[in-house]
Image (cartoon, rainbow, N blue to C red):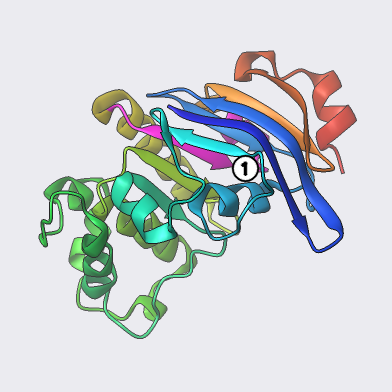
Amino acid sequence: MLTIKNLSFSYGSIQTLNSVDMEMETGQVTCILGRNGVGKTTLLKNIMGILDPLPGSSIQMDGIQLISMAPHRRAKSGLGYVPQGRQIFPRITVEENLKVALQGRRDGSRIIPEYVYELFPVLKEMGGRMGGDLSGGQQQQLAIARALCGDPGILVLDEPTEGIQPNIIQQIGEILRELVEERGMTVVLVEQYLDFVKEFGHNFYVMNRGRVVAEGETSELSDDIISKHLSV
């Protein structure tokens, strides 16, 4: 479980997160929703240790406080991150991209897990190709597979469906479902695509101006919440 309490963050004098409280349940997909600029990516970067929150903030993973922990130690503790825009390494091969993440494994293994190739068989076929030669959808699959190579217990994804063709979006959703149901993984998902959230998510939080303004199970994501907080 990932537990966030009183999480606040500011860029200089501009406060972008204000006393955020969230719980991401083990073995579920928790979706974080909101219009552009409300603090969703900033929240994920605080979880991963890329940004440092204000004093009094708390981020705990299975009871372990992460606030003072460096990003690489968070990765070794079981946090996997798929950033917005994929950010794969374009000038090394697919296989080399995957092997980079093995450095963060808790068990010290330097072998790409076979289940990663079972989830993404196209990556095995294209193992010798440069990451930059892949299509956008294939790069997104590579970014997710790379995070999985680090053996995370909690997978954090920032808008994985952005700019991806519909058939790959559906495939990503099915993979997240399998990770949760078959491997007991916890998934934290920033997402704008509401149909995807409703199909594959379990719980949601809606953010506005750096605060949580609505939460519940995805079955409770009503038209009123959508029109008030999510419609453009």
Identified at 11% across, 62% down, the residue is 110
Q: Eyeballing the image, is 203 above or below 40? A: above
Identified at 49% across, 52% down, the residue is 48
Q: Is residue 187 highlighted in magenta?
A: yes
Q: Image quarter for residue 174?
A: top left
Question: Could you tell whether 200 is left or right of 218 in the image?
Answer: left
Q: Eyeballing the image, is 225 above or below 20? A: above
Residue 171 in picture, x, y percent from top left: 40, 43
Residue 146 in picture, x, y percent from top left: 32, 59
Identified at 73% across, 31% down, the residue is 206
Q: Eyeballing the image, is 75 above or below 57? A: below
Residue type, label 1: Glu
Question: Could you tell whether 157 is left or right of 132 in the image?
Answer: right
Residue 187 in view in this figure = yes
The residue where tag 1 is placed is: 191
Residue 106 in picture, x, y percent from top left: 20, 49
Q: Nearer the viewer, residue 103 or 65?
A: 65
Give the residues drawn in magenta, as a range: 184-198
Question: Could you tell whether 191 is left or right of 103 in the image?
Answer: right
Tell me the quarter of the image containing the N terminus. Answer: top left
